[in-house]
Image: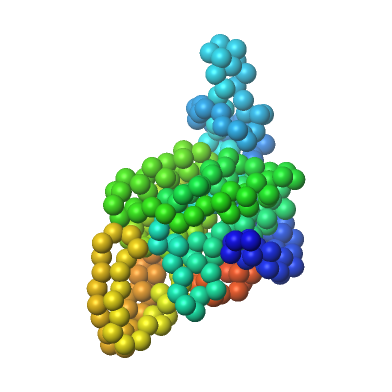
Amino acid sequence: MTAKSRALREFDWGKISGLRLRAESIAEGIYLGSHRSIRRGSGVEFSGHRNYVPGDDLRWLDRHALMRHARLLIREFETETDRVLRLVVDATASMGYKSDSAPVTKLEFAVLLAAVLARVAIAGGDPVALDWLGGANCRWLPPLTGRQAFERVVGALETASARGDFYMDADGIERALLPVLRYARRGTSIAIFTDLAEMPNDLISRAVGLCARGRRVTVVRVLDPAESNFTFRGPVHLRALEGKISTTTDASSTRNQYLAALKQESEEFSARMVQRGGRFVTVCTEDDPAEAIRDIIASFGGGSAGS
């Protein structure tokens, strides 16, 4: 049994049992995507076509285009909203890090949070899609719903392993997020799980861009206890798992400076996301996963987000 499987099996699902009921009481368009508009008239404007992808609602299939051009095209409208939750999981090399005091790696904790969030969404009738940043053995999934959706999402999450280096691949982030930008329509909720290692400004800039057109975006920064609290002692040699950056320092004299810089960086990222309607949440692998999920769901609901 893998560590990711153990984390999922040992998670107390009863701790999130009330989250779906809470979601139903929140105003339209707040929690995990708004419902598709059924209005007709001048308030609904046709905005064009896009290629059909598995999981699309067949009500919006353009049958005339199918007969004329033998192509599956979906009609899109400016006021059309989506209920899809898109999970974007960073599986680059740095996400495989685990300090001695940590219960799991950062990727394993991100996978657990993504799986729990998927279960909450699917229980509420919302489709879930899965995208990746880097990684090996990663399976991308279109929006899924129904009885088998959760098993398919978990199966895809559990097969991934941490690999890849966006520090050495300047266009990697743009390529990875292009499908999200292309297919995430108005009302889509997007949760990006990442440690932001070696790519903080690039990824935050892309996340801010995803906030356009009524999409709700939350960046969930996943840190190891050694990173969030700088638990090292004495002389240490630190080497990045992505890129070639390394340094030797005295942990005692560096700790306060490091923690202050981490706090300032988080506040800046949070401010940039909030300015565009997004949210920024920081979690640690030693946190209670149920509490972390509540913070993430609160961020989609417009509540306060931890930073």
67 vs 270: above or below: above
View extreme (front): residue: 1
Residue located at (49% from left, 65% from top):
106
* Front one among 172 and 49: 172
Viewer can see residue 68: yes
Residue 81 visible in image? no
Residue 127: quadrant of the picture: top right
Give 101 or 31, whichever is nearer the viewer. Answer: 101
Q: Is residue 23 above or below residue 234?
A: above
Residue occupying the point 30% across, 55% down: 167
Q: Which of the 4 image quadrants contains residue 233?
A: bottom left
Q: Identify the residue shown where x is 53% and y is 69%.
A: 104
Does 81 sit left or right of 134 as displayed? Answer: right
What is the x, y in percent for residue 86?
55, 48
Which residue is more in the foreground, 220 or 37?
A: 220
Q: Residue 307's spot in the image, x, y percent?
A: 46, 71
Identify whether 259 is placed above or below 217.
below
Quarter placement of the N terminus: bottom right
Q: Position of residue 205 (x, y in %)?
A: 36, 54
Tell me residue 84's x, y (percent).
60, 46
Q: Residue at x 58, y 45 (%)?
A: 129
> How many marks overall?
0
Dividing the picture into quadrants, the one containing residue 297 is bottom right
- Left or right: residue 197 versus residue 303 is left
